[in-house]
Image (cartoon, rainbow, N blue to C red):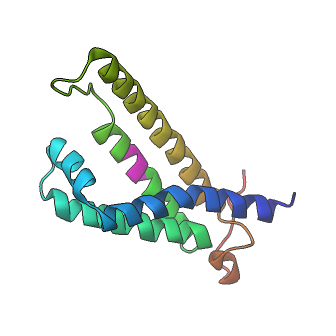
Amino acid sequence: MSTKYILLVARILLSFMFIMSGLGKLADPAGTAGMIAGAGLPAATALTYLAGLFELLAGAAVLVGFQTKIAGWALALFCVFTGLVFHTGTVAVEGWPEGALGWINMLNQIMVMKNLTLAGAYILLATYGPGALSVDARKGASKPATA
């Protein structure tokens, strides 16, 4: 398969989670606002809407390959930040059985690893560009890095 199609498929896959997550936060902010408040950050509802808008716009930018270097670095930093702030530490929910808490804590560790792995993918995207089938390439702004 041609590299231009592989990069297009990669961008579609990398954008999907953030577009869907952004839409979800904007449509129903309560759960995310609770998580943000639980992490001790102020203005949880406002931050939820900002995060949702950021995820939606950055995800769409990756999808179409627009300002890919900026979107890639921004999403990489977002993934590291959210992984470390929201998915490290032990989860303890009063009244929950020990087995359920063990499962939640294991899931939380997986979320950290997922976020750090995604950060690596976005750094690669920011460094090597979105490929030929992108807005950046059409505008002549996509110059892949060379090793």
Check the picture and name the quadrant holding the N terminus.
Answer: bottom right
> What residue is shown at x 63% (from left), y 76% (from top)?
136
Q: How many marks?
A: 0
Magenta stretch in the rendered image: 77-81
Q: Is residue 79 magenta?
A: yes
> What residue is shown at x 34% (from left), y 25% (from top)?
105
> What residue is shown at x 27% (from left), y 27% (from top)?
89
Could you tell me residue 62's position as x and y percent?
A: 56, 66
Could you tell me residue 84's position as x and y percent?
A: 33, 38
Magenta: main secondary structure: helix
Outermost residue to the right: 1
Which of these two is toward me, 137 or 106?
A: 106
Outermost residue to the top: 98
Could you tell me residue 51's position as x and y percent?
A: 32, 61
> What residue is shown at x 69% (from left), y 76% (from top)?
137
Residue 80, above or below 146: above
